[in-house]
Image (tube, helix red, strand yellow):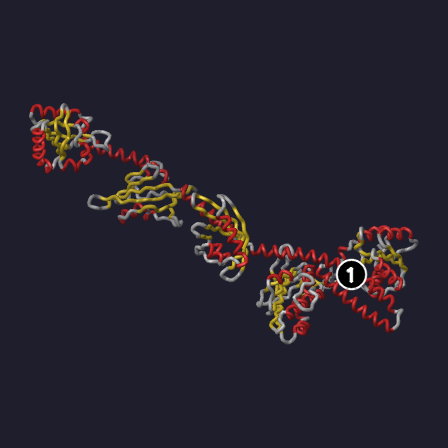
Amino acid sequence: MGWLARGQALRLIMDFAFVEEVPVFCYVVRREGDDFILVQLNAAARKRSPALLAFIGRPLTELYSDQPAVRAAALQSVETSTTVEHDVPFRRHNRTEATEWLRLRYVPMPEDFVLIYVLELHRPEMSETALSESESRYQSLVASLPDAVMLCGADGRVLFCNDVALELFGAASHADLLGKSDVLGPEVMVRDEAGAPVDVTNVPSLRVIRTGTPERGQIYSFERVAQVRWMRVAAQPIRTADGRVTGSVTTFTDVTERVTAQTALRESAARLELALASARMGVWEYEPLTDRGWWSSNLSDIFHVGRESRGLASFLECVHPDDRAGFEERVGAISGGQHGQTYEHEFRIVGDDGVVRWARTHGQLTVDGSRRMLVGTSMDITEQRRLEERLHLASRLESIGRLAGGVAHDFNNLLAAMLGSLDLIDAEVGEEVQKDLATIRHSALRARDLTRQLLAFARKQPVTWQIVDLGVLVRDVQLLFRRLAGPRIEITIVTLDEPLVSADPTLLEQVLVNLVVNARDAMPDGGRLEIRVENGPPDPVSAPHGTACLSVTDSGVGMDEATRARVFEPFFTTKAQGTGLGLASSYGIIQQHGGDVRVESAPSRGTRFIVTLPRVAPGTDAQQKTTRPSSSVPAQGTVLVVDDEDAVRQTSTRLVQSLGYVALEASDGVEARAHVSAHVGHIDILLCDIAMPGEDGRELAAELVALRPELRVVFMSGYSSDMPDIRVEGALFLQKPFDREELAERLATANLKPAH
């Protein structure tokens, strides 16, 4: 087509402008060969089918690819220059079959243009088909959904539901639900998330009909025959064109698996929280690059530190000053480490309440690209540390106690020889010499008292057991306490209870005196002293009937941590004058009685010693005592003296002879057995040392008693021993060092014992 033809075509198109306002579907095509090109659409066509705009400039055969009669009718109209009409079936893009008929009118125009009008023809049978197809598609769609769907009318009655809804509501068929407004059968119970039952008149499908407001996302439980299913319910009102609510459509999405998982997760988290709380443990995280940290609320409660996000510098303010450098160094080292690297560190935290607590932190570094994150746990190990310190102290004191006991044993052997020799020469010297001997005896007795304190610390002090009312004991000696403390110290005695304990009252008085004297020395300018007696809780192992608590509290200068750690060590003292054995012996006595003693103190805040002893069973007579028989039986018979220490053995032998007995002497078990085998006549008493090199005196005594059943046994030792540990029936015990009178009493008592 030349430029003149193109100009004429353009004028024609401009002349076609009138079709823009035509109220029916209309478009213009131009013939090219055996086909036609779409050149224009009017407003009605664009509104009805906007997608047709993409076909402008394209062949008509593409627009009606399944309708070849359209192109043929257009050719007929152009070639015959007549208006042509024909009806064609039409299928919309969302239909599976033709549901409409269109009447196409072809009007020929100059220059091979054709104006095509499209008129819709309404046929009842096709409308019914469209409706049926729409309903079928809708039902197929709803039936394929995994969710339960229910359609209700304006009165709330069920108009439609799918098979999933039947299963949910326990219905056998659609007939069981259709037409009903109450679809919850007697076997179905619906509850909201809080567990409250839902009234059948207040279900979402009915509420949205009343209110016209959609409801989405509410979760309910459906309980039927011991089966619980959780559903997310969404209800939508159905409206007419004028906005009236004519029904509702409700969907039920099964979220049982998710709710069950969430419940299990919450329960697991609760169990974890409980376990962490029981272990006094919590979790934390720290990001080194941003210097931001976080920890769980239970750690804030445990260590009394706020939960606000903290950087390293801020958190270091909570760390004990002596531990800050080490803590910062460890955090810096792990922050620059490799992915998966772990670390463990123990340090002290100073809480907002001023209390110092120990923390054990375990962490791991995770590296994700440029991001570094430290995550881990922290545990309060304050009590564990305290127990470890007490165990370490007990172990150290036990070692020192063994040393002290050994020293006391050897020293008692020396003193036994000294005091025995003094008794032997006392009657053979003049008056002037006796004065010197008295001085020596006094010094030896003082040395004996020191060794007894060492033995008390080593828990080898002889104990005379009896039932003691601790409250009565304290009140009976309060005058002594007041004289010891002096007029500048105010003493308060509080006896809330009167617990009964099995103890040696003399040794308990010694403990009280040591504690009062220690408190007095801590208050040189005067102060307040409280002695309190009360019942304590039971211990299933050591004190099944409960404990008795005796506390001595002063307002003195107090002690620092280093002093507290050594306060029970023998020979340790902060006084200008003192042996350092008072508290050490008190510790040994309490341990020997099956109890415990601990100290609480701080500089300038006074000191409190707490003594706990196991109480005896209720109803025990407080006046019950253990006594030993005594007699003045004449000295007669033969005594076999066995001791590996030459000085002790020789002195003891001479003392025995001075009392009127016949004495045999043996330095070890070999000589003792030889005497027993060779001696003609009776051997009445065996006076035997317990601790001898290479042989236990108790085993030797048992062997000799088997050979000589008439033999009576008196053990002697620089240690002490309770009667049940002596292992020989009816045996007596004599504590070294002893004097002539003590030896005479034991031998006389032994003579009263029946023969074995």
Horizontal and vertical percent position of residue 79: 8, 23
Report if residue 621 is visible in the image: no
Quarter of the rendering occupied by the C terminus:
bottom right
Quarter of the rendering occupied by the N terminus:
top left
Report if residue 727 is visible in the image: yes
Question: 195 or 48, which is in the foreground?
Answer: 48
Q: Quick one: SS at disc 1?
A: helix
Give the farthest residue toward the right. Answer: 680
Please give the name of the residue rendered at 84% of the width and 66% of the height, measured from the top-left corner: 422
Which residue bears the numbered disc 1? Answer: 411
Q: Quadrant of residue 97?
A: top left
Horizontal and vertical percent position of residue 680: 93, 53
Horizontal and vertical percent position of residue 434: 85, 71
Give the crowd class for mark 1: few <14, some 14-19, many >=20 residues within 10 Å. some
- How many numbered badges does the structure rendering display? 1
Q: Is residue 509 above or below residue 22?
A: below
Question: 503 or 50, which is in the foreground?
Answer: 50
Q: Is residue 248 above or below residue 668?
A: above
Horizontal and vertical percent position of residue 706: 84, 50
Please give the name of the residue rendered at 29% of the width and 42% of the height, measured from the top-left corner: 249
Q: Quadrant of residue 466?
A: bottom right
Looking at the rendered structure, the kind of residue marked 1 is: Phe
Q: Quadrant of residue 628?
A: bottom right
Q: Is residue 587 left or right of residue 662?
A: left
